[in-house]
Image: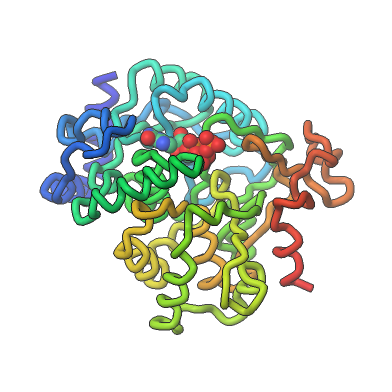
C-alpha cells in the first residue's frame, strides 16, 4: 500500500507539479481547531494530525487497460465517478459501487475518486479496489475545505442548532452535516485531484441503480451542450433555509448579469422569483460539468452565500444551492433530466416513464414505484417550463 502511495505521489506530482504547490498552499492556510460544540463531529480527530500528502491520494488498479471494445469504443469524456464517504459506510458504499459498476462502468471504464475528511482506512481501500473495474483513488479533503470557518459566530451557530433540534429538524444539531453541505456546495470541485476532470457523476453510499446505462451520459451531456443532470426533483424542508431565497434575491439584484436568458426560474418560483417554491434537484445524484461551479457566476454566488453564514446559522443544503444556481445561471435546456437512469436513494425511487424504456434498459424497478408524480415531487414544475 505504501508503495502505491509513494509511486502515485511521485507520478502524479511529476505529471502535475501544481499539485505540490497546492498542497503547500493548503498547509499554510488557516485551519480551524476542534469544533466547539459537543456534537458527534466535535469528536473528530483534529485536521492538523494528518499527513498533507494524503490530499494527493493513493491510486490503485493503475495497470487497468480500459474497458472492453464496444459501446463507445475507447472514446471517453474527461470524467470521474465521485463519492464522498466515511470509513464506517464501507458496506453501503460497496453496494452503490457494485451496482454502478455492473449497470454502467464495467463497460465504460471511468475512474473512481473517493473523498473523506479523515484518511481512508486499509480495509476500505482494499475492499473498494477489489470491486471496481478501473483505477480508483482515495484522498483526503483539505481541512480548510471542510471545517467550520473561524469567522462563524459559534454562539449564534450553536443556538441555531439547538433550536433545530428542538423542532426535530433532520440533522438539525449536526455540525458535520453542515460541513458536508458546505463542502459539496463550494469546495469539492476545488480538490487538487478534481482539477484534471471536467465532468463528475456524484454517487452516494447505499443507493441503487435500477437500469442498464449503455449510453455514456457524460458524452451525451457533452454532445448536447448540457451542464447539469438529475434524476429526482423534490421539495426542500423550509425550516433549513429560511433566509436562503432572500439572500439569492439580493445576489441577483446586485449581479443581474449572471442570470441567463431562458433560465428555469419558472421551475423555482410560482411568482416570477418573488418567493421560492422549495423545488430542487436531489443532489445525491448529479452528473455535471465542473466548469460551471468553477466559473465566475457560481464562484461569486457561492462566496456571497457563504459570507452570510447560512450553512452554519441555518442548515443550507448543497441541493438547493446547486439547483438554484443551475436554474438561474444556465439556460433551462442546459439542465437535463435523465429519465432512463433508474435511481433510488431511500426513500425515493425514480423509474423511467418514457414508454418502452423499462424493458429496453432492463430496469429492475417498477414504474408505479416512481416518485416523479407523487405529491412531494417537483417533476410537474420541471416539465411545465418546457410547455
Ligand atoms: N467523509 C464524510 N462523508 C460524509 C460525512 N457526512 C456525510 N458524508 C457523506 O456525504 C453524503 C451525504 O450524506 P448523507 O448522510 O447521505 O446525507 P443525506 O443524503 O442528506 O441523508 P440520508 O438520508 O441519511 O442519506 C454521503 O455520501 C455521505 O457518505 C462526514 O462527516 N464525513
Ligand atoms: Mg444520502
Q: Is residue 30 visible?
A: yes
| Residue at left offset 57%, top offset 45% | 285
Q: Is residue 8 above or below residue 194?
A: above
| Residue at left offset 46%, top offset 22% | 90
120 relative to 172 in the view: left or right: left
Where residue 173 sits: x, y (%)? 39, 40
Q: Is residue 344 above or below residue 321?
A: above
Where residue 28 sits: x, y (%)? 11, 48
Image quadrant where one finds the N terminus: top left
Where residue 44 sits: x, y (%)? 27, 29
Residue at the outermost right position: 355
Image quadrant where one finds the C terminus: bottom right
Front residue (pair 81, 237): 237
Q: Is residue 148 above or below residue 129?
A: below
Within the image, what quadrant is residue 214 found in?
top right
Within the image, what quadrant is residue 360 found in?
top right
Front residue (pair 312, 387): 312
Within the image, what quadrant is residue 271 found in?
bottom right
| Residue at left offset 59%, top offset 35% | 105
Where residue 308 sits: x, y (%)? 32, 64
Q: Is residue 84 visible?
A: no
132 relative to 188 in the view: left or right: right
| Residue at left offset 34%, top offset 68% | 304
Front residue (pair 66, 334): 334
**Applied colour scheme:** rainbow
Front residue (pair 348, 289): 348
Amino acid at each position: 500500500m505504501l508503495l502505491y502511495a509513494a509511486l502515485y505521489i511521485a507520478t502524479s506530482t511529476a505529471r502535475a507539479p501544481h499539485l505540490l504547490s497546492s498542497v503547500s498552499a493548503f498547509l499554510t492556510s488557516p485551519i480551524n481547531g476542534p469544533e466547539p460544540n459537543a456534537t458527534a463531529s466535535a469528536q473528530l480527530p483534529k485536521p492538523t494530525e494528518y499527513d498533507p500528502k494524503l490530499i494527493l491520494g493513493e491510486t490503485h488498479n493503475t495497470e487497468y487497460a480500459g474497458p472492453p471494445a464496444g459501446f463507445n469504443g475507447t472514446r471517453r469524456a474527461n470524467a470521474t465517478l465521485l463519492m464522498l464517504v466515511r470509513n464506517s459506510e464501507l458496506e453501503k458504499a460497496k453496494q452503490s459501487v457494485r451496482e454502478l459498476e455492473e449497470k454502467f462502468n464495467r463497460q465504460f471504464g471511468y475512474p473512481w475518486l473517493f473523498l473523506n475528511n479523515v484518511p481512508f482506512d486499509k480495509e476500505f481501500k482494499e475492499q473498494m479496489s477489489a470491486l471496481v473495474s478501473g483505477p480508483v483513488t482515495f484522498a483526503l479533503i483539505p481541512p480548510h475545505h471542510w471545517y467550520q470557518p473561524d469567522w462563524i459566530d459559534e454562539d449564534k451557530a450553536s443556538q441555531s442548532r439547538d433550536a433545530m433540534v428542538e423542532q426535530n429538524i433532520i440533522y438539525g444539531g449536526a455540525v458535520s452535516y453542515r460541513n458536508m453541505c458546505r463542502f459539496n456546495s463550494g469546495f469539492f470541485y476545488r480538490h487538487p485531484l478534481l482539477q484534471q476532470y471536467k465532468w463528475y457523476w456524484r454517487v452516494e453510499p447505499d443507493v441503487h441503480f435500477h437500469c442498464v446505462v449503455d449510453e455514456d451520459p457524460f458524452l451525451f451531456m457533452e454532445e448536447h451542450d448540457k451542464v447539469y443532470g438529475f434524476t429526482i426533483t423534490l421539495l426542500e424542508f423550509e425550516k433549513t433555509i429560511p433566509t436562503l431565497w432572500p439572500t439569492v434575491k439580493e445576489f441577483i439584484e446586485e449581479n443581474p448579469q449572471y442570470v441567463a436568458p431562458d433560465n428555469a426560474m419558472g421551475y423555482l418560483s410560482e411568482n416570477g422569483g418573488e418567493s421560492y417554491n422549495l423545488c430542487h434537484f436531489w443532489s445525491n445524484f448529479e452528473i455535471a460539468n465542473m466548469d460551471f461551479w468553477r466559473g465566475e457566476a457560481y464562484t461569486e454566488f457561492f462566496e456571497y452565500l457563504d459570507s452570510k453564514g447560512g450553512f452554519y446559522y441555518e442548515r443550507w443544503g448543497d441541493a438547493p444551492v446547486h439547483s438554484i444556481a443551475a436554474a438561474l445561471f444556465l439556460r433551462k435546456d442546459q439542465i437535463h433530466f435523465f429519465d432512463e437512469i433508474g435511481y433510488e436513494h431511500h426513500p425515493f425511487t425514480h423509474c423511467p416513464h418514457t414508454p418502452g424504456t423499462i424493458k429496453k434498459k432492463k430496469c429492475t424497478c417498477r414504474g408505479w414505484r416512481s416518485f416523479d408524480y407523487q405529491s412531494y415531487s417537483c417533476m410537474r414544475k420541471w416539465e411545465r417550463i418546457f410547455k
